[in-house]
Image: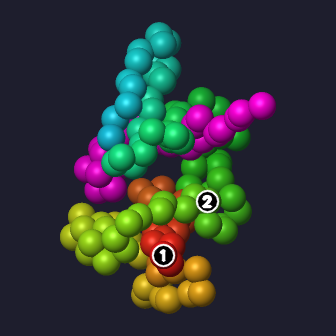
Amino acid sequence: MKQKIGSIALVVRDYDEALAFYTQKLRFTLIEDTDLGEGKRWVLVAPPGSSETCLLLTQAASPGQEARIGDQTGGSVFLILHTDDFWRDHAGMQAQGVHFCEEPRSEAYGTVAVFEDLYGNKWDLLELKG
């Protein structure tokens, strides 16, 4: 049997503002943006060069969903963005105004720093050791 995680839903306030953040500030690729009618869209983005797992940007449709925007994991790191060049991506993200919550640090597994998306969800930017 073969399985994989195809996409991870991320609750957002607005499709277009989220799409702008991910494609401009993080340089993700727009994979699909399909109008589903009644204000709903199927919006998939992925990191450059990634074909396995995408983010499904899901616009909040209820007060309960709106309450979770930016806090999908209760304040812990939500997603880990792997990179082949930490310092290149860290500098590029800082130049785009991405907020890092800490200084980069070296761990046994690699170089890492926590950053926030436009809603405050925490991510790790991580370059694994060879």
Question: In this orientation, does residue 69 appear?
Answer: yes
Image height of 10 relative to 121, above or below: above
Number of marks in the image? 2
Secondary structure of residue under mark 1: loop
Which label was assigned to residue 130?
1
| Contact flag, marks 1 and 2 (Cβ < 8 Å) | no
The residue lying at 65 percent from left, 53 percent from top is 72
Q: Which residues are magenta?
A: 1-28
Residue 51: x percent and y percent? 45, 39
Residue pointed to by mark 2: 78
Residue 6: x percent and y percent? 59, 35
Q: Residues within 10 Å of mark 2 (few under 14, many from 20)?
A: some
Farthest residue, direction left? 95
Q: Is residue 102 magenta?
A: no
> Which corner quadrant of the image does residue 70 belong to?
bottom right
Query: Could you tell me the amino acid type at mark 1?
Result: Gly
Q: Is residue 96 left or right of residue 67?
A: left
Query: Could you tell me the amino acid type at mark 2?
Result: Phe
